[in-house]
Image (cartoon, rainbow, N blue to C red):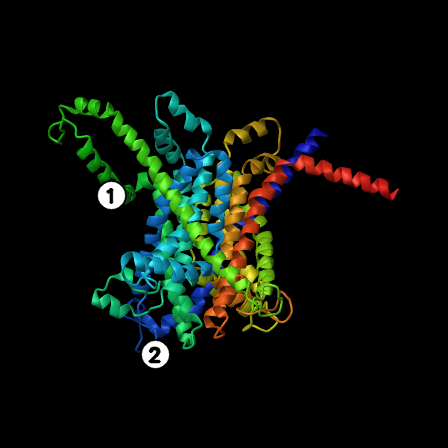
Amino acid sequence: MQNHRTKNRIIKDKSFSIFSQILTLLVILIFIVLVLFIFIRSIDGWKEYGSTIFSDSFNLSATPSTSQASIWLPLSITILVTFGSLLIATPLGIKSAIFLKFRLNKRYVKPLLIIVNLLSAIPSVVFGLFATSSLGEFLTLLLNTSLTFSVLNAIIMLSFMVLPTIVLLVYNALDAVPKELYLNPFALGSTKNQSIYKIVLKESRKAIIVAVIIAMGRSIGETMALNFILVSQNFNAVFSSGQNIFVTSLKTLGAVISFNYFGENATMATRSLLNAFGILLLVFVIILNLFVFFIQNKNMKSKYQFLRKIETKVIKILSYIPEHLIMFFEYVFFKNSEKLTLKNDTNSSKFIHQRFNRKKLFLINKWTKITTEFIAFSFVILFIGWILIFILVRGGQAISLPTQTITSFDLDSTGRAIVNTIVIVVIGILIAFPFTLFAAIYLVEYTKSPRFRNIVMFFVDALGSTPSILFAIFGVTFFLQTLGLAAGGPNSNSLLAGILTIVIVIIPTFIRTIEQSLSSVPDDVRINAYALGVSKVSTIFKIVLPLALQGIITAIILAISRIMSETAPLFLTAGLTSSNRFNFLLPGQSLTTRIFAQLFNPASNAQDIMYEASFMAILLILVFVLISQLIIPLSFQHKDKIKKLFQKRKVSHAQATI
């Protein structure tokens, strides 16, 4: 009997391992198929435009024979906007996460995390609307120059778009660090700041890099919000004149692709060229991910010394200004009587002794860190308050008008768009969550090869950094034109194609965040369970997953946020309008595509529709966040009580029927 149970347990573990491995390999297959489809569609572009793709002049309006389709100029704007936004968002995000974890009373952390989650789920088109209507005006008044349609406005907007992703992931990483690692330094005489910055942050370094990678993917992939702000393609004139790039409105490469792909003058040759741009942008993303992968890999750094040198240079560049500000501050206010030089270090012991005995210096250092953390988090909260007040006030005015369409469910109404959005979110999560959960479980619990795991995570990161417009192009070419998942034919749209495209979009975010939360569960938990005779599958589902619940909930929130914020994959696949009846094979307008569609709507109430749709998007996001952050965790905490309540009702119902 015992042998039979053991045999069944082994078969169960092996079957689950094989099934999870197949789902994991599907991630690589999805990326390869996506690249192949776009590459095949780009062949004509390579033939027509040839070497002009790498020229130093940009002009898409001419015929292929005379066109200069330079990729370098829009790509340089992409690099500037992406890294500019990360330079703002990364320190703000890390400092905010530290403030939430170590400085605040725990009773305030939960509601504040809900507020941060709200920011993460605000649709990109709402950010674009806010940036052109409010943020741009503020920057114009502040700097006394027109910045509404500028690269600087785009960088600041994008930094706040990716900020909540960094805050949430870094907070989860800090929360997963064993408490002993944080408390043990106190016994050795270390301060709280030293424990946080020297021990806890160092332990969370890998998770912080993951957070930055995901944020970078969101930044590179953003197109629709940037199309609100960046309206110019006059690269030649700007670069030749030496004009300040930050005050211009030059488009990023993703914005160029999305703007021209279905433009009025778009030809098949132009679209093929834009597919070629997409492939080259993917190559750029892959190179970035390879660089991050090599920098993280200790074996690679020991084998190739130039990688360690590059890492050191990057750290020096990033820390140059903060370090020199501290050195200057110390030199002015706490000048040491002993001087050290490279040639003379005889007084080093006296120098160190004097420095360590300066209590004021340590006190100021402590309060400087606390103050910067408070200021960083205040920026986050103020920005969230600003954008929410802007949308709620303007949206509230719009829904109070007699022309509002929230209560209508006609084909051109916000009420219909709300229904479509809920359907896309719910079905998208139901399809993607089990798929990505099993893939993450295999990577953490089953794979024995670090090389295989690294290869899979590389493809996940590359897929996550893919611009959203490329997902949209793939959705059109594969789900609509190849598989024909639309009742109106290959040139039509369908809700099903939109859902399947959005599933591919959220897979990388899901896998990365779930994998990180599973990895944070201590190995001692698993070892103790195995020692007690618990099977691997039972250990995963009954012990590991409940311990990783908070991280998994965060993964769901980030996935919902990504769905709610996406426009490009939906407007090309699901369409900008709804059909006269609900059907998965017919077009279905979401809230984000409804907002975007108003840019082309000549009606007088177009702006009111934008604000009412934005208002309902915020309310819908709030509902999803409250369900995921409050209702689901509470139901898990009180599952025994809920189970007993249902059993009592079942018994009373049975007695009543008797």
Give the side of residue 392 with respect to residue 14, left or right.
Answer: left
Residue 308: percent from left, percent from top: 29, 41
Left-right relation of 49 to 543: left
Q: Check residue 321 in the rendering and tell me which mark sits there, or answer none.
A: 1
Give the amino acid at mark 2.
Thr
Please name the residue shown 39% across and 68% down the image. 274
- Along the polypeptide, which appears first: circle 1 or circle 2? 2
Q: Neighbour class for label 2 at 10 Å: few (<14), some, many (≥20)?
A: some
Q: Quadrant of the N terminus?
A: top right
Image location of residue 105, percent across then percent down: 47, 33
List the single residue furthest toward the right: 658
Please state the horizontal and vertical placement of residue 430, each as a whole percent of the image: 60, 52
Image x and y of residue 602, in percent = 47, 75
Q: Which mark is residue 63?
A: 2
Is any part of residue 633 visible from this angle? yes
Vertical placement of residue 502 versus 342, above or below: below
The answer to whether residue 504 is visible is: no
Q: Is residue 560 above or below residue 418?
A: above
Q: Tag 2's secondary structure? A: loop
Using the numbered discs, state the Cα–Cα distance from disc 1 to disc 2 in whole angstroms: 48 Å
Q: Residue furthest left?
A: 343
User: Could you tell me how many numbered marks the image carries?
Assistant: 2
Q: Residue at x 31, y 38 (%)?
A: 302
Amino acid at circle 1:
Ile
Residue at screen point 32% across, 65% down: 250
Which residue is at the front of the view, 182 or 27?
182
- Relative to the observer, which residue lies in front, 400 or 200? 400
